Image (spheres, grey):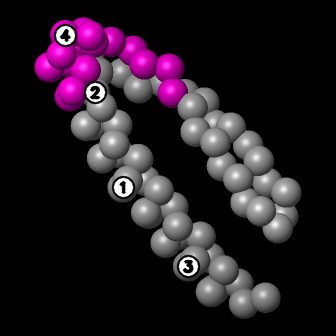
Amino acid sequence: MNDETFNLSIRRFLKVVGIRSQTEIERAVARAIAEGTLKSDAVLPASMRLTINGVSLDITLEGEIRLE
């Protein structure tokens, strides 16, 4: 295994996940606020599931997103 290649590959994957996730969250929150179904000072529980086949990784990360 090439550690440098492995590390860079993980970082690329996480960059895509991070950017895409942020974009989707921002869109969903803006839409919900515009529709009146979400207050602009809400605290949203959030979770993300990470699975990687081939190494039996299946974890759920939990946190919260605060709008104010």
Seen at 84% across and 64% down, the residue is 55
Depth check: 59 or 27 in front? 27
Q: Nearer the viewer, mark 3 or mark 4?
A: 4
Of the residues shown, which amino acid type is indicated by label 4? Gly
Q: Earlier in the sequence, mark 3 or mark 1?
A: 3
| Residue farthest to the bottom, as pictured | 2
Q: Earlier in the sequence, mark 4 or mark 1?
A: 1
Label 2, label 1: how far apart the Cα atoms are: 16 Å
Please give the residue where the numbered disc 1 appears in the rendered image.
19
Q: Which residues are magenta?
A: 30-46
Asked whether the beta carbons under mark 4 and mark 1 sit within 8 Å of each other, the answer is no
Of the residues shown, which amino acid type is indicated by label 3? Leu
Q: Earlier in the sequence, mark 2 or mark 1?
A: 1
Label 3, label 2: how far apart the Cα atoms are: 31 Å
Of the residues shown, which amino acid type is indicated by label 2? Val
Residue 7's label in the rendered image is none
Q: Is residue 29 above or below residue 22?
A: above
For numbered disc 1, what is the local secondary structure?
helix
Q: Nearer the viewer, mark 3 or mark 2?
A: 2
Please tell me how crowded label 2 is: few (under 14), some (14-19), or many (20+) other residues with Cα within 10 Å. some
Quadrant location of residue 27?
top left
Please give the residue where the numbered disc 2 appears in the rendered image.
29
Q: Is the N terminus in the top left, top right, bottom left or bottom right quadrant? A: bottom right
Please give the residue where the numbered disc 3 appears in the rendered image.
8
Q: Is the C terminus in the top left, top right, bottom left or bottom right quadrant? A: top left
Q: Nearer the viewer, mark 4 or mark 1?
A: 4
Please give the residue where the numbered disc 4 appears in the rendered image.
36
Of the residues shown, which amino acid type is indicated by label 1? Ile
